[in-house]
Amino acid sequence: MSWLAYVDESIRTDDGVYVLAAVALERVDAAAVRAAVRALEPRPGRRFHWRDKEPYERRDAASLLADLPVLPIVTIGAPVDPRRQERGRRHCMAALLFELAEAGVEEVWLESRNPTADRRDLHVIGGFRTRRIVPGGLRIGHARPGDEPLLWAADIVAGAASAGAGGDAAYRELIGAKLTEHQVTLG
């Protein structure tokens, strides 16, 4: 059994919450999950993005995710100073990558933000490896959401968890039976 994970973020600058979410799945399920998630955005060249969707589309996406063979894991960090989001990302990433490695995930794909931010992530991950927070054998890279629909699944988890942190728990409750959640205090 070989496990993969795809990771995306959500930031609530108005109330200082940083969410880093992952979907973990067995490699053998990747093609089926990818196809199911791709159906959320049937127009070629478009990608599903939580923040651009109407409430009914978000509900449908969370319901779909609840029925797929994925394990959603989320790390929520607060309070986050909007000017120090990278600090929140580092703390949440350390906790999330540790949990993924402990769960037996062998390969992690983070959503690519831009070349500079991606290099910064890899530098931070190198520090995690040095401090043995993340094992050397855990493969970690970046992927673009336009190329990898499995990142959309992580976006759904991040969006649902972020909405829940903001007081709208309806989406989170749809995936809640499968969701593992960790809180990181950043204050």
Image: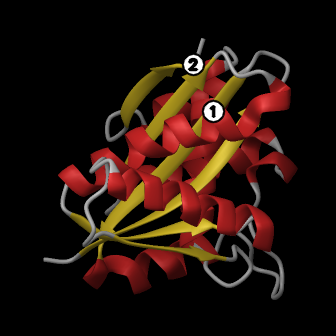
Q: State the image quarter where residue 85 is shown.
A: top right
Nearest to the observer: residue 42 or residue 92: 92
Nearest to N terminus: mark 2 or mark 1: 1
Q: Are marks 2 and 1 in contact (CB under 8 Å)?
A: yes
Residue placed at 67% from the left, 60% from the top?
120
Residue 169 visible: no
Residue 128, placed above or below residue 15: below
Element at label 2: loop
Residue placed at 35% from the left, 58% from the top?
129
Residue under circle 1?
A: 88
Residue 90, placed above or below residue 106: above
Residue under circle 2?
A: 186
Q: Residues within 10 Å of mark 1 (few under 14, many from 20)?
A: many
Would you say 2 lies left or right of 145 here?
Answer: left
Residue placed at 27% from the left, 68% from the top?
136
Name the quarter where the C terminus is drawn. top right
Would you say 140 lies left or right of 54 here?
Answer: left
